[in-house]
Image: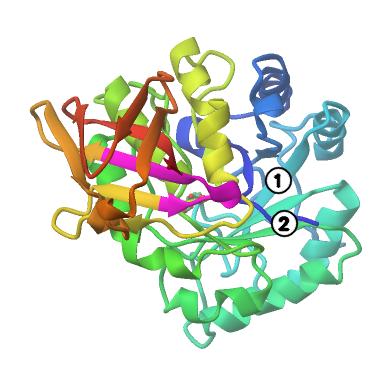
């Protein structure tokens, strides 16, 4: 059963754009295994736009992988990815052209789904460029949704219409397992904050088998180039804000940095067992802001009687963040104590009613919290 929990993987787009090939994909698959990403839960290796030739095969009408990128065909790479115990993802688009102006799947949905199934594809990212004006988004996604259901292989359907066309009202019916609800991320602090702030009120519709998608992570890209690249990059604290919000918000974790050489510091963050446990919690409850004033303190009910708490400091000065227990939903007179465990440092803190915790500038703290007598 797929997408019971937020999907986890890696996608070529953020760092590589159209600059990838078979050998690099095999190296990335190796890095996913050897550097511990697979053990942490990352399972899909996804190839984004630009894998396709400029035209379909004139005889069969099928999409054709670019021989310059895949000299021995794409199946060889897919088989290699599978041999590593990973799954393989590919990209197409609901319009007549992909965003990179390659042939897309409009009016070829069934043929393309069948082709992907024959190759052994496990995940399809499905974009929204060059959509015919006469067609509704929901019809187009439903068509591919049915084509995938009927293609003879279990393929995760990752819709990518950037939150447009009132997507939350119909996307679950289309069969999609996740759906992009934001514009494209870039590797800056402003982009990270813009995206997570825009999602706070949209997470109620994100649930098992159809998750809201905040786009691929830029954690660890630093000053890398590529479509999401930005020479400014983010600081370690700013990357912590990105990864912690994506985990807290229960959205898919699709990595976008170069897994082969990302710093150990970021590898450790991206593979943090407690953060991933919060992201993958089986009840998949939406987080909610604790204090209504600045909406930078979040709480999320976890299975097993625990809570996740995230405190974000978007100011340029260190500060103390916190709240009154009443804002979380109960009175101090209940006699309970709140036991906080910092998921990154392991530090333990106990509070009765007033919570006050230091948070450095442009950084965050994330906790697992239990109520004890
Ligand atoms: C759109 C998507 C991106 C990426 C590119 C590829 O912009 O939102 O994530 O897939 O297309 O062309």
Residue at 81 percent of width and 54 percent of height? 116
Look at the image and tell me in which quarter the N terminus lies: bottom right
Residue range of the region highlighted in magenta in the rendering? 300-311
Asked whether the viewer can see residue 18, the reply is: no
Closer to us: 362 or 194: 362
The count of marks equals: 2
Residue at 51 percent of width and 18 percent of height? 268
Residue matched to label 1: 89
Residue farthest to the bottom, as pictured: 134
Compared across the picture, whether 353 is left or right of 93 comes to left
Residue at 24 percent of width and 25 percent of height? 232
In percent of width and height, residue 251 lies at: 51, 51
Q: In the rendered structure, does residue 263 fall within the stretch colored magenta?
A: no
Q: In the rendered structure, does residue 306 fall within the stretch colored magenta?
A: yes
Asked whether the viewer can see residue 213, the reply is: yes
Residue at 47 percent of width and 30 percent of height? 15
In percent of width and height, residue 260 lies at: 59, 16
Nearest to viewer (mark 1 / mark 2): 2
User: Around disc 1, counting alpha carbons within 10 Å, would you say few (fewer than 14), some (14 to 19), or many (20 or more)?
Assistant: many
In percent of width and height, residue 359 lies at: 21, 28
The image quadrant of residue 48 is: top right
Closer to us: 201 or 28: 201
Q: Mark 2 and mark 1 in contact (Cβ < 8 Å)? A: yes
Mark 1: secondary structure: strand
In percent of width and height, residue 322 lies at: 20, 41
């Amino acid at each position: 059963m797929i997408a019971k929990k937020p999907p986890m993987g890696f996608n070529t787009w953020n760092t590589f754009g159209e600059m990838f090939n078979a050998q690099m994909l095999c190296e990335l698959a190796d890095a996913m295994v050897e550097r511990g990403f697979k053990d942490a839960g990352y399972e899909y290796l996804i190839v984004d736009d630009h894998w396709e030739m400029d035209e379909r095969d004139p005889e069969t009408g099928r999409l054709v992988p670019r021989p310059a990128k895949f000299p021995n065909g794409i199946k060889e790479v897919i088989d290699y990815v599978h041999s590593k115990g990973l799954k393989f993802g590919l990209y197409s688009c609901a319009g007549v052209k992909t965003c990179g102006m390659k042939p897309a799947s409009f009016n070829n949905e069934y043929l393309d789904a069948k082709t992907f199934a024959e190759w052994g594809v496990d995940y399809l990212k499905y974009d929204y460029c060059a959509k015919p004006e006469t067609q509704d988004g929901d019809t187009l996604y439903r068509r591919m949704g049915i084509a995938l259901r009927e293609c003879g292989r279990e393929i995760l359907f990752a819709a990518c219409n950037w939150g447009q066309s009132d997507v939350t009202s119909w996307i679950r019916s289309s069969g999609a397992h996740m759906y992009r609800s934001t514009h494209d991320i870039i590797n800056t602090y402003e982009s990270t904050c813009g995206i997570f702030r825009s999602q706070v009120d949209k997470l109620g519709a994100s649930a098992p088998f159809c998750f809201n998608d905040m786009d691929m992570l830029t954690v660890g890209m630093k000053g890398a180039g590529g479509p999401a690249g930005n020479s400014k990059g983010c600081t370690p604290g700013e990357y912590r804000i990105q990864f912690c919000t994506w985990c807290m918000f229960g959205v898919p974790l699709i990595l976008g940095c170069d897994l082969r050489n990302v710093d150990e510091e970021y590898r450790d963050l991206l593979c943090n067992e407690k953060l991933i446990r919060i992201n993958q919690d089986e009840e998949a409850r939406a987080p909610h802001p604790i204090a209504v004033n600045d909406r930078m303190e979040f709480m999320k009910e976890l299975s097993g009687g625990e809570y996740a708490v995230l405190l974000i400091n978007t100011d340029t000065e260190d500060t103390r963040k916190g709240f009154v227990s009443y804002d979380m939903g109960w009175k101090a007179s209940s006699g309970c104590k709140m036991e906080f465990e910092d998921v990154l440092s392991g530090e333990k803190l106990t509070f009765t009613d007033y919570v006050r915790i230091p948070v450095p500038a442009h950084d965050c703290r994330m906790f697992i919290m239990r109520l004890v007598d």
